[in-house]
Image: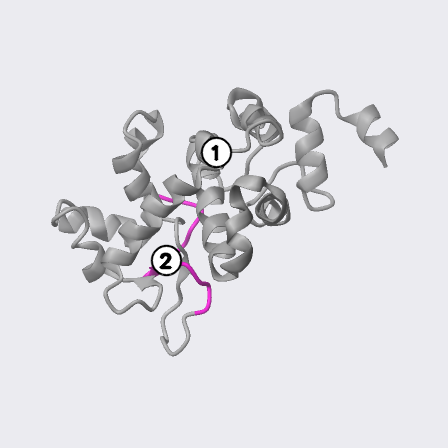
Amino acid sequence: MWRKILQNCHDDAAKFVHLLMNPGCHYLVQEDFVPFLQDVVNTHPGLAFLKEASEFHSRYITTVIQRIFYTVNRSWSGRITCAELRRSTFLQNVALLEEEADINQLTEYFSYEHFYVIYCKFWELDTDHDLLIDSQDLARHNDHALSTKMIERIFSGAVTRYVSQPPLLGFSGDCGPCSEPCVPLSRSLPHVILSCVEPECSCHVRS
């Protein structure tokens, strides 16, 4: 396996994509990052406290994935390519996971503190705490700073074109008793939150 990777993958970006991608693909989708990030949760010393809070594993992983796509996937295709990885700082941050014991120092993608800021903003909006947000909930964001037209665009999928018709935003793909489909948090909502909490990132201009 390694011989084949070394023969066909000539830099770190190509190797990373090859290791995580589905067979026959030449790009990464969001689900491809889950095993990698679960390993980070399980093994990084800065996340050892999460062993006693397993319900936060998927929420942290989901949010990190969205931070990755928010920054790296400049094409908004929902598919990260080798070229996009090469243009980003993501692999440098992956290398730092081995060197930096304090996960909160890795502020671009992996910081637990940054995740918690996003999660707390979500929790404030999710008043019934069903882990889902509808357009009325989102209207309360940042003291009603979002216009009705902007909220309609978010829920139409217009600002995240690899998501179709998300009437609800949440942390779970299972909407329980709700009859409407929902999508994981950060498919749309974190683009709003990230644009507020990370204004130095040029990505938010696209929203």
Which residue is located at x 37 percent, y 40 percent?
Answer: 114
Indicate the position of residue 146 as horizontal and vertical percent values. Answer: 16, 46
Task: State which quarter of the image contains the N terminus.
Answer: top right
Residue 45 left/right relative to 56: right
Which residue is located at x 37 percent, y 76 percent?
Answer: 179
* Mark 2 secondary-structure assignment: loop
Residue 182 left/right relative to 135: right
Residue at which label 2 appears? 165
Magenta segment: does it hold 175?
A: no
Q: Which residues are magenta?
A: 160-174
| Kind of residue sitting beneath label 2 | Gln
Residue at which label 1 appears? 73
For the residue pair 114 and 100, the one nearer the viewer reads as: 100
Residue 32 left/right relative to 172: right
Indicate the quadrant where residue 182 lies: bottom left
Which residue is located at x 69 percent, y 46 percent?
Answer: 22
Indicate the position of residue 107 as horizontal and vertical percent values. Answer: 42, 31
Task: State which quarter of the image contains the C terminus.
Answer: top left
Residue 10 visible in the picture: yes
- Label 1 close to label 2 by CB (< 8 Å): no
Residue 30 left/right relative to 1: left
Residue 158 visible in the picture: no
Magenta segment: does it hold 165?
A: yes
Indicate the position of residue 88 as horizontal and vertical percent values. Answer: 51, 24
Mark 1 neighbour density, 10 Å: few (under 14) some (14–19) many (20 or more): many
Q: Earlier in the sequence, mark 1 or mark 2?
A: 1
Quote the CA–CA distance across marks 1 and 2: 20 Å
